[in-house]
Image (cartoon, rainbow, N blue to C red):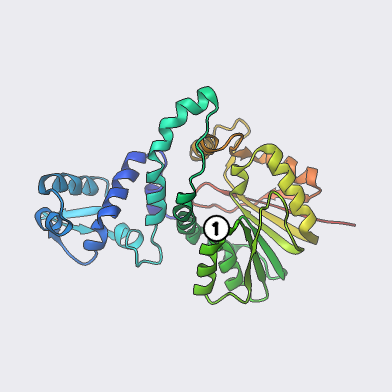
């Protein structure tokens, strides 16, 4: 993935992200996609304060999302590609979701001192699903081309959310039938996404909780970043459940934010681990050694980390179920 997306999603640059969120909220990038306007015109159209709007627009120039020429503002390429809702590469939903979590960090002291975690907000479910789709749209086509799935007939996407990975796996492999397992509130958004790609006959949904049951038998199990939501004990149980649902010679593919053995690097994953711990007791990111132990304990063989570079510091861990 190119440096433009890394720039937008740099977790260490949270203030810039929030400023970008406000720009999206005003619709500034949509307004300037084909126009050059001065600050007075922009403020008038958006019914905003002229003086403050000018200062704000100058900041968007400073952080390189707009350009300014003869007191008129216009989008640069990164804004037109990623910040216009009609663009297939739009990432405004994930920007909005991450910016809306700004206040979560105010609870960090309480979480560390007393173990008080932020409870899940059902009203934020839609924002989360849209944000997941924004992120997956970059990795899903890439992984669909990189992963060899021509041998498989049935794949289960565990905790698959918006279903983006299953959709692209099915598009790339015409023989493959996919099932997406997730909770009912999540899957109402997934249905619409599958239908929009015309894949309802090959991408199905299963309402359920992967921490209780994984129904059916499959050649491939795909899990994307759900392990960081769970404790080590829950992850071990989940991987054993995955082993049981796979056919002989079936494969598990885990996309996850791995840490080094000291759990201090990469820095993006260390910060993400802290964020997960803030929201759920015992949730965090794990090292490859820990994940490898779960797989082997469940009965998997040939556990390995693929040499595929993904833009968001995620890794792919793959293993096989081999029964003699």
In the rendered image, the quadrant that contains the C terminus is bottom right
What residue do we see at 65% from left, 38% from top? 231
- In screen coordinates, is 207 left or right of 196? right
Where, by quadrant of the figure, is residue 106 drawn?
top left
Q: Is any atom of residue 3 visible in this view? A: no
Where's residue 281, x and y in %?
A: 59, 34
Which residue lies at the image location 53% right of the left edge and 63% below the top edge? 188
Looking at the picture, does residue 12 appear above or below residue 195?
Answer: above
Given residues 148 and 24, the one toward you in this image is 24
Judged left or right of residue 42, residue 321 is right
Q: Is residue 233 left or right of residue 259?
A: right
- Relative to the observer, which residue lies in front, 52 or 146? 52
Question: Residue at 14% of width from left, 54% of height from top?
Answer: 43
- The correct choice, above or below, for 315 with respect to 204 in the image is above
Asked which quadrant contains residue 323, the reply is: bottom right
Label 1 sits on residue:
186
Name the element at disc 1: helix
In front: 303, or 300?
Answer: 300
Look at the image and tell me whether residue 203 can be seen: yes
The quadrant in which residue 229 appears is top right
As drawn, the residue found furthest toward the right would be 324
Q: How many marks?
A: 1
Q: Position of residue 8 (x, y in %)?
A: 37, 49
Q: Residues within 10 Å of mark 1 (few under 14, many from 20)?
A: many
């Amino acid at each position: 993935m190119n440096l433009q997306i890394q720039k937008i999603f740099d977790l260490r640059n949270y203030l810039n992200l929030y400023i970008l969120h406000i720009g999206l909220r005003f619709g500034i990038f949509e307004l300037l996609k084909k126009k050059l306007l001065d600050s007075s015109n922009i403020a008038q159209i958006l019914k905003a304060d002229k003086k403050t709007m000018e200062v704000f627009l100058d900041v968007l120039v400073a952080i390189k999302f707009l350009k300014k020429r003869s007191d008129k503002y216009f989008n640069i390429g990164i804004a037109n590609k990623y910040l216009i809702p009609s663009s297939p590469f739009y990432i405004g939903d994930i920007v909005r979701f991450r910016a809306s979590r700004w206040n979560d960090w105010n609870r960090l002291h309480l979480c560390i001192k007393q173990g008080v975690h932020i409870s899940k907000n059902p009203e934020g479910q839609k924002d989360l699903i849209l944000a997941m789709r924004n992120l997956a749209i970059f990795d899903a086509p890439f992984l669909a081309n990189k992963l060899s799935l021509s041998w498989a007939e049935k794949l289960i996407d565990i905790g698959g959310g918006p279903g983006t990975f299953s959709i692209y796996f099915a598009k790339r492999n015409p023989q493959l039938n996919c099932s997406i397992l997730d909770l009912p509130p999540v899957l109402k958004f997934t249905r619409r996404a599958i239908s929009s790609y015309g894949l309802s006959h090959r991408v199905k949904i299963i309402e359920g909780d992967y921490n209780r049951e994984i129904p059916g038998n499959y050649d491939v199990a795909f899990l994307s970043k759900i392990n960081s939501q769970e404790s080590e004990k829950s992850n071990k149980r989940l991987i054993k459940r995955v082993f049981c649902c796979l056919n002989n010679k079936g494969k598990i593919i885990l996309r996850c934010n791995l840490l080094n053995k000291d759990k201090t690097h990469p820095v993006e994953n260390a910060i993400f681990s802290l964020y997960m711990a803030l929201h759920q007791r015992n949730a965090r990111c794990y090292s490859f050694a820990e994940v490898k132990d779960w797989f082997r304990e469940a009965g998997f063989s040939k556990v390995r980390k693929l040499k595929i570079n993904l833009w968001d510091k995620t890794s792919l861990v793959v293993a096989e179920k081999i029964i003699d």
